[in-house]
Image: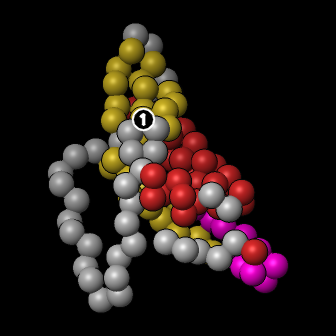
Amino acid sequence: MEIVFNMKLPCKLQKRKNWVLASCPVLDVTTQGETEHKAKKNLSAALSLFLISCFERGTLDDVLKDCGFKPVQPGNRLKQNKPGNFINVPVPLSWTKTHALHNQCHA
């Protein structure tokens, strides 16, 4: 089974000579591109790979907690994000019964 969820994360862009640096300070991930569009696309891919890697190693809960993420109780609505630069990150995760038994979410 594959589950795909999307995260909306803050993004900072900085012009540096011929490059645009794109970073997500919340998860401490940075990349670059020749244009703003390419830098954001590269950041989305880097974040997706980072989150998938954490999931596969069974460290996703700890990483998100360490970065200040908190679980939302059912029925509670999330606060609207402040205006600013955000990036949408698709995170496809492969899930097996064996994986579910050994790496249960404890968030």
Residue 42, percent across and down?
Answer: 54, 38
Q: Is residue 50 left or right of residue 38?
A: right
Q: In this view, does 99 lie to the left or right of 64?
A: right
Mark count: 1
Residue 76, percent across and down?
Answer: 27, 83
Give me the residue at 42% from left, 24% from top: 20
- Where on the picture, by quarter, is residue 79? bottom left
Give me the residue at 42% from left, 50% from top: 67
Within 10 Å of disc 1 (Cα), the crowding (few <14, some 14-19, many 20+) is: many
Quadrant including the N terminus: bottom right
Q: Please, which colouring scheme is shown?
A: secondary structure
Q: Is residue 87 in view?
A: no
Query: Looking at this rendering, what residue extends furthest in the bottom direction?
Result: 75
Task: Name the kind of residue labelled 1 in the image.
Answer: Ser
The residue singled out by tag 1 in the image is: 23
Residue 101, percent across and down?
Answer: 75, 81
Q: In this view, does 75 lie to the left or right of 39?
A: left
- Where on the picture, by quarter, is residue 70? bottom left
Query: Looking at this rendering, what residue extends furthest in the right direction?
Result: 98
| Up-down relation of residue 102 to residue 70 (above or below) | below
Q: Is residue 94 found inside the magenta-colored segment of the image? A: yes
Query: Is 71 in front, or is 25?
Result: 71
Give me the residue at 63% from left, 65% from top: 92
Q: What stretch is highlighted in magenta?
A: 91-101
